[in-house]
Structures are given as structure tokens and as C-alpha cells.
Amino acid sequence: MADDRNDDRDPDRDDDELRDMLSQFLSGNGASIDPSRLAGAAGLPNDPASIQALLGQLQNALMNPGGGINWDIAEQQARQLAADGGHAVTPAERASLDQAFHVASLWLDQATGVAAVATLGYAGMLLGPPVIGFLADHVGLQGALVLLIAAMGAIAVGARAAAR
């Protein structure tokens, strides 16, 4: 929200002011930081409650540097944020979403099927000549080509059986 920001201020002066406030905060004197001043210096919306909560979290994180992330608090905040923005889903919305997911799964099935066939085709192009060459060394070129035709027939019969 542009009207909540202090856009008419000098950015160099704001940088110095922000640097001074952060120095004061990091030295352990964070209680004296004015949240609205910090928001103005950082170019953030002027919401003192949010800035005060941010300062509290930052100060807590700095006081416990070896503790890492408190996953219980992170989960609690995530659940709270999800609940704040959540709303009850009507049966019509649910039906619409179910239909959209069904259509998406149909498309995804087709897309992954095409990808699998393309991958097998590419593998066949890469591996076919060396395999035929290997077979030709052992059974001759005519024998290798007969084995290739037999393998293709076996694949066709197997595909027909798998389709049933």
C-alpha cells in the first residue's frame, strides 16, 4: 500500500536511520525502538503491531542463537495464519474443485504417458545400434536382425495382452 509508506523521505537518511536502529537493537536495547520509526526507515507499511511482533521474533531469535528454529512455534504460527485466511467451503465450491482436480489428473495421466513413451523411444534409439552390433558379433548380422524382429513380435504380443 503506497499510501502507508513514507515515499517522500530521503533514502540515504533512511538507510542511516535504519542502520542506527538496528545497531541499537542488536546491542540489546531493542525495547526503546519505536516501531513506527522503524517502519518508516525500512520503507515498510506503518503497522506498529506487525513491526512490534517482528521485533520480538527477531530479538528472540538473536537471544537464542544456538537453538535454531523452534518448529513448534513455526507450526503454531502457520496454523494460525492458515486459519485466519480460511473459510468454509460450500458444496458447490467443493464440487467445482473436485471436477478441476479430476480434469487435471486426466491431463497429467496423458502427459506422463506421453513422456514415458518418448523416453522409451529415445532409449531405443540410443541403445538399439549397440545392442544390434553386439548381437551381430555373436550370431552374425542376419541372426541379430532376426532376433530384433522376434523381440518386436514379443513386445507386440505382450502389449496386446497387457491391454486386456
Image (tube, helix red, strand yellow):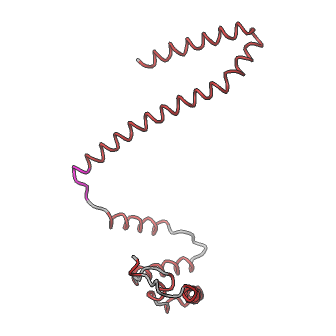
Q: Residue at x 46, y 79 (%)?
A: 44
Q: Which residue is at the front of the view, 64 or 114?
A: 114
Q: Which residue is at the front of the view, 104 or 162?
A: 104
Residue 30: x %, y % from top left: 52, 88
Residue 92 counted in the magenta span: yes
Q: Is residue 24 left or right of residue 49?
A: right
Q: Residue furthest bottom?
A: 32
User: Residues in magenta?
Assistant: 88-93
Name the quadrant containing residue 138.
Answer: top right
Q: Residue at x 51, y 14 (%)?
A: 156
Residue 140: x %, y % from top left: 75, 8
Q: Is residue 39 left or right of residue 106?
A: right
Q: Residue furthest front?
A: 8
Q: Residue at x 37, y 67 (%)?
A: 81
Q: Which residue is at the front of the view, 127 or 12?
A: 12
The quadrant of the image that shows the C terminus is top left
Residue 9: x %, y % from top left: 49, 88
Q: Residue furthest left?
A: 91
Q: Is residue 154 above or below residue 7?
A: above
Tag count: 0
The quadrant of the image that shows the N terminus is bottom left
Q: Is residue 2 above or below residue 99?
A: below
Q: Is residue 35 above or below residue 119?
A: below
Residue 159: x %, y % from top left: 49, 18
